[in-house]
Amino acid sequence: MNLTAEEQECKAKKLRHFEAFEDTCPPYLTPKDDEFYQQKVRTILILKAEILTLGMLVLRSHGM
């Protein structure tokens, strides 16, 4: 299967992201831990930022 240069670049970028995070493992927290809810809020904010970024990239790719 022949990939375009853009598809190859995207694939390489994803691979670099996976490699950057492969050695990091977030701590396992329970509701009894003080940091549990702070970590949960942080995770939600990060996910929202990723969704927003993806949405903006989709709009940009469609010329909007």
Image: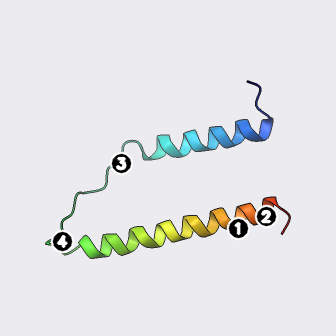
Which label number is shown at residue 24?
Answer: 3
* Secondary element at tag 2: helix
Rendered position, 41 above or below 24: below
The crowd level at tag 2 (other Cα within 10 Å; few <14, some 14-19, many 20+) is: few
Find out whether the residues at labels 1 and 2 contact each other: C-beta distance under 8 Å.
yes
Dot 2 amino acid type: Arg
Q: In the image, what residue type sits under mark 4?
A: Pro
Dot 1 falls on a residue whose secondary structure is helix
Counting other residues with Cα less than 10 Å from the Cα at mark 4, is it few (<14), some (14-19), or many (20 or more)?
few
Residue located 41% across and 42% down the image: 22
Residue identifier under label 1: 56
Q: Quadrant of residue 53?
A: bottom right
Sequence order check: which comes first, mark 4 or mark 1? 4
Residue furthest left in the image: 32
For marks 3 and 4, give the CA distance. 22 Å
Question: Which residue corresponds to mark 4?
Answer: 31
Q: Position of residue 55 (x, y in %)?
A: 67, 66
